[in-house]
Amino acid sequence: MKLKITLITVLFLNFFCGQAQVTPTLLHNNLGGGAQFSDGMDMEIFNNEIYISVTSAGKIVKVSLAAPNSPVVDVVTGLTSPVGLKVVGNELYFLQHNNLLGTPSSGKLSKINLAVSNSSVVDLYSGLMYPVEIDVNGTNVYVSEAFKDSNDDLISMQISLINLSGTPSKTVLNNQFYSLDDFEFKDNALYMIEWSGVEAAGSTRLLKLDVTNGTAGTPIEYYVDTPGKAFYKGEIYNNYLYLNTDTSQGVVDRMDLTSAIQIPSVAITGFDFNGNTPYIGEMIADGNNNLYFFADYYNGTTSTYLLYKANLSSLATQDFEKSPKVTLHPNPTSDFISFSNLEDSSEYQIISIDGKVVKTGNTNADEKINISHFTTGVYTARLGNKSFKFVKK
């Protein structure tokens, strides 16, 4: 948990150094009525069109971004609960799952060719356990899978790797999650949003899982949702992780993944629909500084589904004078370690060679951290997204 002084310092800097906020533009004021989009929709962009999964209707639709309120067009129908869209080149990868109890391994990975009209669905891998989310890196497809009980209640979730080179195969990377709401791939790591299942402040945390070797591993926790914003969906663009806030409608935060201190700040606000504030769900970036948002407004009886656009180019990226490089000393060591050149109190983790977190806390510059009781070996100390290996003698 960050010290209060750290949060106050960061907020002070954001305010007085011109941290900008963006107001989005409403592009579509009625994507569809009823509840058809309410149960697991996802979005992707291809050729200035947004593709949306309509899970309950068993189809994928698209809407052009060329003009406001463009018509919603069916792309492929007859699917079984499509979710988790991902565009790679001209191909759209997606997941399908069977909602029926008693068929837990009926999920599958499929794709269509977006460059071909009426492209046939190609099934790539079958036997998934209720797949939910997807990301792709080359021939590696990362999938979150859910396990449910006889009452259709969630028990746990796992992250799996499907390797499509040669004969497709699946490797479970980690199966110790309660609920993964979303994940994003960047620089050989998966950035994940995990919900604890508790409807209370601090119910979500952000995790990072190194997937470089394609083998099972333990994720590192890099942010705990202490303000109780209950992050739900995320999108990474230009080293920033954009996050909606489940407890604050109409607000999108962002977090600098290159910073040593991970604290979210409000980036996009002012979502408006006829004087009302809609709920913000899925997000997708187009690669040209634009972020698109699926949203819905519920009037107490029915939902209206909306599409917004926010241009990110006006967001301040703060040009602070570069601080001296943070270092760990002494190394090797037998009694303590310290970090030099820290500007603020910072949260740290010390991780053993087998991936276990053996010590956490907050430290200031050159403050001694006692490690005299550690067994001899190699450890990793983490400050935000920075890692320092050291040897305990």
Image (cartoon, rainbow, N blue to C red):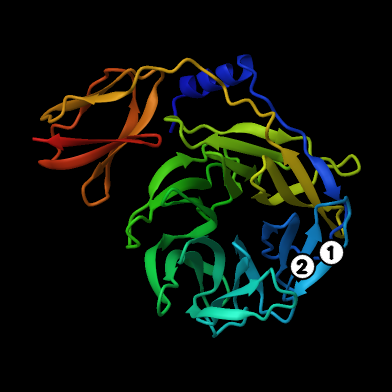
Where does label 2 land, which residue?
61
**Quadrant the N terminus occupies:** top left
Residue at screen point 88% across, 62% down: 71
Q: What element carries label 1?
A: strand
Q: Image quarter for residue 111?
A: bottom right
Identify which amino acid the numbered label 2 is placed on.
Val
Crowdedness near tag 2: few (<14), some (14–19) or many (≥20) residues, C-alpha within 10 Å: some
**Quadrant the C terminus occupies:** top left
Compare residues 175 and 80 and report the one nearer the observer.
80
Residue 264 in view here: yes
Residue 374 relative to residue 294: left or right: left
**Residue 304 percent location from the top left of the image:** 85, 56
**Residue 78 percent location from the top left of the image:** 72, 82
Q: Distance between the residues labelled 1 and 2?
A: 7 Å
Up/down of 20 relative to 177, above or below: above
**Residue 143 percent location from the top left of the image:** 50, 65
Q: Do the residues labelled 1 and 2 touch (CB within 8 Å)?
A: yes
Q: In the rendering, which numbered label is found on residue 72?
A: 1
Report the residue that reaches farthest toward the front.
115
Q: Is mark 2 on a helix, strand or loop?
A: strand
Residue at screen point 72% across, 63% down: 52
Residue 33 in view here: no
Residue 130 relative to residue 310: left or right: left
Q: In the rendering, which numbered label is found on residue 274?
A: none
**Residue 357 percent location from the top left of the image:** 29, 44
